[in-house]
Amino acid sequence: MSVVFPKRDAEAKAWLEANPDVQSVHVVWTDMCGVARGKVLRRDEVMQAWAREREVLHTSTHAGWPLGCATAIATLDALRFKQLVARSRDVGARFLDLLRGELSGAPGFVEARGAGLMIGVQLSSAAMGIATTQAMLREGYVVLTGGLAGETLTLTPALTIDEELLGPFARTLRRALGATTAA
């Protein structure tokens, strides 16, 4: 059984404890813009059924929400009318070539791979990934780590990115790799 509960966490947790037959509580409120927000509180034994060793299970609180659906339709229209999938494929291929050329021989660089503008830059270790992520952040670039151990930088620029921004990024990444090994 699941109950929508329009109050804050503490009250919802207390209500959940007082009602042992209920498995989850949906805490819902409206933000200052009138957008519904919320989260789900579940009993530990229910959450353990979702536990995964190496993957994250994503869920949705507001599936079917009209504003969310309208946003999704507008996104699909933009992808189609602006031909962003084809642009992503073309720009991504050039970006991969740029990264491979710029990073070839750089300390800790293993390979660059990807599809479209979803690109991974594999490094020699998770420690190198974390240090490089921090170095790039200091330079003003937000990159995340991925891979089984965090050894891969995940790059997902906007599908509309100006290609002139990719060269400076690649050069900064090369400098960050050099500085990371020197440190």
Image (spheres, rainbow, N blue to C red):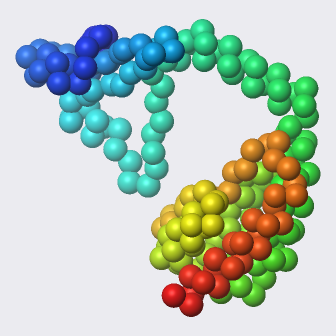
Image point (85%, 77%), residue name: 101
Residue placed farthest to the left in the image? 18
Q: Is residue 152 visible?
A: no
Q: Nearer the viewer, residue 78 or 166?
A: 166
Dividing the picture into quarters, in which one does residue 165 lie?
Answer: bottom right
Left or right: 11, with 34 as reference point: left
Image location (x, y in percent) of residue 163: 87, 55
Left or right, 51 with respect to 169, comes to left
Residue 68 placement (x, y as % from top left): 60, 17
Spot occupied by residue 27 in the image (x, y as percentages of width and height): 31, 18
Residue at horizontal 60 percent and vertical 57 percent from the top: 142
Instruction: Name the residue: 82% across, 42% down.
Output: 160
- Judging depth in this view, the residue of 147 and 1 nearest the camera is 147
Residue 11 can be seen in this image = yes
Taking depth in this image into account, of 149 and 38 the one nearest to the observer is: 38
Q: Is residue 164 above or below residue 123?
A: above
In the rendering, at what x and y percent does residue 26 appear? 32, 18
